[in-house]
Image (spheres, rainbow, N blue to C red):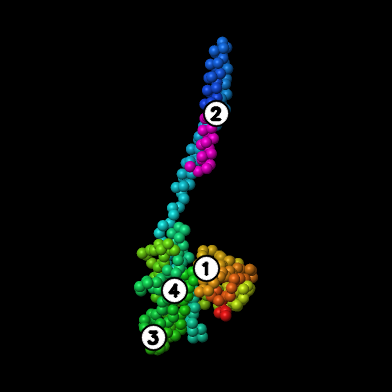
Amino acid sequence: MNEACETLAATGNNQLLILGGSVLLILVGLFVLKKRGFVVKILPIILLLFLGLYSVSPITTYAQSAEDCLLQAGQEESQSPAPVTSLTLQDDTSTMQLPDGGNPTAVHYMTLLVNDTPPSDDPLDWNTLDIDTGQVGIQQSRSILHPDDSAYSCGVIDVLINGMLRIALEYTCYDNLANPLTIDNDFVIAPFDYTVASENNVTTDSPATVTVSVTATPAYVVNGVQDSLECEASQTIDILANDSTTIGTLDPDTIDLDPNKPGIQQTYSYVHTPVSTPYTYTATVVGGGSIIVTTEASTSGMTFFYTVSNTNGDTSQVTLINGDSCA
């Protein structure tokens, strides 16, 4: 029983005790008066009517209110979602730009775990993300093979922090003998499965499938070359300066610094754990397309991502912001 229901029930019980005590006192009083020779006729009736009006009605009201409260509490409890004990993975799709002779390498970043459902209070552990389930162990890297000849490697797919995928597709593929083979507009990246476990090692027997489409058509919102951080403890950079859109204008309010989470996150913190002393770095959107980045140490190893949308609602691909190597 919740606290509100307990209060109502206790109040009703108190009213019942008051009524019982009052009736007992009346009976004792009548007995005493009769012993002393008083003739009492109408007084008991008046007093009993008064007590009935004063006490019985509140008792009924509180009892009914307590009953209603318990019924409502039971309904609310039955409507509460049960804790999730299993792990469910969802398929993922993304589209990237094809490389060409002028830009021989196309790099695409893809969120992977944002639509998966971990057990309650047991987040996914991206360190267990396996993107090549056909091999023994956890594989966090796989080659992109040419669809016409699997002897040629056309790039690589890697797992980055927080389960982000980096897909690097090359215009020219090579086999083990360094023979070249260029790609064309019909190039297809073969879909692949992945698995991941929760921090408490809850797993699933049903992997999810990743499908990456490639297109020669430029996106509506285009990120320029990746932004770099200097070796400073605090700095502000305009991350939209090298981005553009072919429709509308870029909307700085849509900068999302953590595409691995639903919604727009305009602050991102990460604990970097090198061999030496760990430190935290934080990025925050400060308006106009700029972010401020602060850290407790050098910016070596700092890596985070962002997306941005235009006023037409088109969202860019995920783009990397990387820290320089500091001495």
Residue 122: in magenta span:
no
Three-letter code, disc 2: Ile
The residue carrying mark 1 is 259
- Amino acid carrying label 1: it is Pro
Task: Please say if 214 is above or below 38.
Answer: below
Instruction: Decide if residue 1 is in sight here.
Output: yes
Of pointers 2 and 4, the one earlier in the residue sequence: 2
The picture places residue 268, in percent across and down from the top left corner, at 56, 67
Which of the 4 image quarters holds residue 290?
bottom right
Q: Secondary structure at mark 4?
A: strand
Q: Residues within 10 Å of mark 3 (few under 14, many from 20)?
A: some
Q: Residues within 10 Å of mark 2 (few under 14, many from 20)?
A: some
Point out the frontmost of discs 1 and 2: 2
The residue singled out by tag 2 in the image is 18
Q: Is 63 above or below relative to 39?
A: below
The circle drawn on residue 212 is 4
Residue 303 seen? no
**CA separation, marks 1 and 3?**
35 Å
Q: Residues within 10 Å of mark 1 (few under 14, many from 20)?
A: many
Task: Please report whichever mark, 3 or 2, sits nearer to the chain's N-terminal start.
Answer: 2
Q: CA distance from mark 2 to mark 4?
A: 76 Å
- Please tell me whether residue 17 belongs to the stretch shown in magenta: yes
Q: Which residue is mark 3?
A: 175
Name of the residue lying farthest toward the front: 276
